[in-house]
Amino acid sequence: MEREIPSSSDMLYDLIIVGAGPAGLSASLTACYLRLKHIVLEATAAGGALMQRYPAKKVDSFLGFKGLTGKEVARRIIEHVKSEGGIIIEGEEVKEIRRDGENKIFQIVTGKNRYRTKTVLITIGIIGCPRKLCIPGEDTCECVDYCLVNPEDYRGKEVLVIGGGDSALEAAVMLDEVCKKIYIAHRKDKFRATEKNQERLEQSGVQVLWNTELKQIFGTKKIEKVCLFNNKTDKENFLEVDNVLIFCGSILNVDFLRHLGLEIEKNRLKAKDDMSTELDGLYAAGDITGRLRRIPEAIGQGHRAVYSIYKYLKKPYWA
């Protein structure tokens, strides 16, 4: 049974967590155990990239969850947090964070409410806005996607995957099981994905196009063809495919943090080893810190951040 959400007007929280991905959910669970009065604010739906970007992906690198999909893992984590009393408020995007210098209380402004808290933990992940190629036809064609939600949607089709990281390779391998033909184009001559994903790709029927960039997509509702450019030979060629999936990263929205004077580099928030920032009372964990982007790392950072917050607020004798 979910707890009733207190009124936002008068309540003063110990902690407000911004983002309900693995880092934020881990932080909430830890806050429940430490009895910190807190809530989690999520702009869209809880679960982060596991639920929204990689729901069909098998999560094999997360201890104890082998064989489960991102969606299944997210559901289990969310259920665990809620069972311990965690409160997750979905559909509340944070627009602004203010801090009263005199009493050191933060005010968080969303599109719906205002919240007051002693500390803030930023755990927004990689979902953000997908990084686009900004090429002709990218925004006008309906068959261009930036995440793989359901491989069955592409059954029997010819698909071009763009990218050289884990997300691109994993999508290509999954699609190889249901598609007529899969191509993966990478602008370099080496992938940056893990060795395991590269081995899986080599064992699949995916055709790799090295040193290849996507320059134009022709078509409106359906793709007629795409223009590819080989940056080694300086030659262009055309390829007929049904769909294009682009995995070139995401752009995190950190604009609501800039006025606080925080150190932000390449849209990443610099955090110390205890996950604190240079602003007293504000912490960061997960992808926003720019460290290793893996579920176990995000969960560990969320846990560590809340223990640091607990020490900051309660000043226990053992700290």
Image: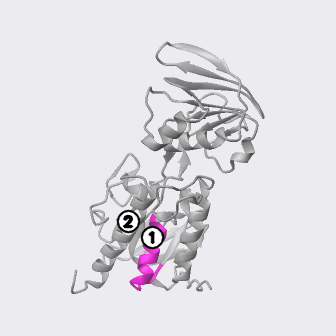
The stretch in magenta equals 23-38
Is residue 235 at all visible to an observer of this figure? Answer: yes
Residue at 29% over, 70% down: 280
Task: Give the percent coordinates (x, y) of residue 91.
Answer: 61, 67
Q: Main secondary structure of the magenta part?
A: helix
Q: Residue 22: x percent and y percent?
A: 48, 64
User: Quadrant location of residue 160?
Assistant: top right
| Pointer 2 or 1: first along the chain | 1
Q: Residues within 10 Å of mark 1 (few under 14, many from 20)?
A: many
**Residue 26 belongs to magenta span:** yes
* Residue drawn at point x = 55 percent, y = 44 percent: 170
Q: Is residue 131 visible?
A: no
> Where does residue 202 sit, x and y in percent of width and height?
52, 33
Q: Nearer the viewer, residue 170 or 21?
A: 170
Q: Residue furthest right?
A: 221
Q: Which residue is mark 2?
A: 300
Q: Residue at x 32, y 64 (%)?
A: 275
- At x 65%, y 41%, the residue is 175
Q: Give the left or right position of residue 171, taking residue 61 as reference.
A: right
Residue flagged by tag 2: what amino acid is it?
Gly
Where residue 6 sits, quadrant-wise, is bottom right
Looking at the rendered structure, the secondary structure element under dot 2 is helix
Q: Give me the disc on residue 26.
A: 1
Mark 2–mark 1 distance (CA, rounded to whole Å): 8 Å
Instruction: For the residues labelled 2 and 1, say whether their Cβ atoms are less than 8 Å apart.
Output: yes
The mark found on residue 246 in the picture is: none
Left or right: 51, with 33 as reference point: right
Q: For the residue labelled by badge 1, is the local secondary structure a helix, a strand or a loop?
A: helix
Quarter of the image with the N terminus is: bottom right
- Looking at the image, residue 319 sits to the left or right of residue 151; the answer is left
* Callout 1 amino acid: Ser
